[in-house]
Amino acid sequence: MALVLSACGAGQDGAAGKTACGTGKPASGPPITVGAIVTASGGIDFSSATKAARAYFDCVNAGGGIGGRPIEYLVEDDGLNPQKASALATKLAGNEDLVALVGGSSFVACGVAGPIWEQNGLFDVLAVGVPRACFESPRISPVNAGPRISAVAAAQYAVEVKGAKRVAQISNRVPDVGDWTQDGVRAYLRSKGLQSAGDILHDPGIKDATAVLLEAMRGRPDAIILQDPAPDDAAILKAAQAQGLKDKVTFVCLTPCYDTTFPGQVGSYWEGFVSNSEFTLLDADTPDNKLWRRVMDEYADDRAPRDSFSQGGFLAAKIFVDTLAKTTGSLDRASVSRALSEVKGYRSDLLCGPWYFGRAARHNANHATRYVTMKGGGWSKIKDCTPAQDPDLAPILQAEKQLGLTG
């Protein structure tokens, strides 16, 4: 399948007429239909991934599409409601033109959607896996590491770099999100001969950050792992500032905090605050990351977040496009599913290691992350690719070797 795609170029190339993602001649054939389910309401907005995926698809369409065919992107908001997510998955799967799911990011969809994808011969290149089910499906492969891996990585930093002995956790109680994430940290702590100093679960969308923080402080922690969406994490940090806790407790955040706007939200008091990052640095001067930034500048709304999950949406879309660019013959659901299921050892400078789909029973290809610190109103890298020490990764690592998934 012919695809005119410039992997390292971006912007309009003047006389050559090339766009960031092709020749500059817009796609005009019959559309290739893909879908995504996102949690964009209901107290949580995780839509930055689908916004970035759409921006990349728009860029590809402007540059000639895939074999001259544009990508039609159907995005559905589940509103943090599993029943609605199930209905949306059924609706998408019932669309005979739909060939795959790409770039989604939902707190509740994976558990209900995974079986629907399997029943209908679909594969899901997920941008942001959140609940446990996103990482335990043969039909879903997230490009991100996930909250559990990110939380374990954050705990590793607190324990192995800062010397923490009493680690507490704050997360939401969305089923198979907060509890599953905290299970991972507890397993890591046990491997180091430590126990949790307190595991706090709260309703999504913190209403009283001070109360949540004080509950976490009851166990006298010397470190607290923040495991929420960025607005809730910022609220906790502001409450901690009011309590004067910066020099008494090490706060470490998961990937959601790593956003270009976050330092401005929490202020200079938190200079030196550390966050985990599931992808490369937002300002990394590498080909794929430069393309992500320029695609966002040209094809996304100025208000669309430039965060790690935006990188994930872009990468999921790029994996899909790169895969179809090498696929011969007609592009229907069966051929696209076959092509996606054969992806192994996909490399991008956004990731620490290769991504894959393959015929694995579960997927968590991204399991090495980076660390950044707030500095001068922005972020600076302090530690590069570091494997997560989650005992639950054992079967994943075994499958990677047995099935040759990493290429």
Image (cartoon, rainbow, N blue to C red):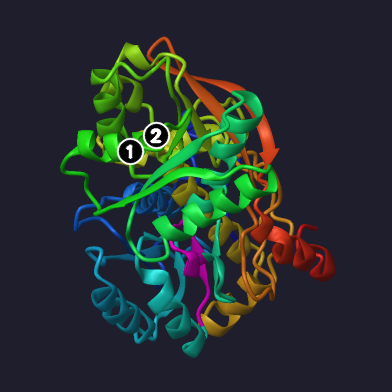
Identity of the residue drawn at 36% across and 70% down:
109
Q: Is residue 71 magenta?
A: no
Q: Is residue 402 left or right of residue 187?
A: right
Q: Are marks 2 and 1 in contact (CB under 8 Å)?
A: yes
Residue 290: give x, y in percent of width and height: 53, 31
Q: Nearer the viewer, residue 137 or 54?
A: 137
**On-image quarter of the C terminus:** bottom right
Q: Residue beneath label 1, please?
A: 230
Q: Quadrant of residue 337?
A: bottom right
Span shown in magenta: 122-134
Q: Residues within 10 Å of mark 2 (few under 14, many from 20)?
A: many
Is residue 322 positioned above or below 309 on the image? below
The type of residue carrying mark 1 is: Ala
Q: Nearer the viewer, residue 361 or 62?
A: 361
Identity of the residue drawn at 43% across and 59% down:
179
Label number found at residue 347: none
The type of residue carrying mark 2 is: Cys
Q: Is residue 42 left or right of residue 220?
A: left
Residue 294: give x, y in percent of width and height: 44, 33
Q: Nearer the viewer, residue 383 or 212?
A: 212
Identity of the residue drawn at 65% across and 70% down:
327
Q: Earlier in the sequence, mark 2 or mark 1?
A: 1
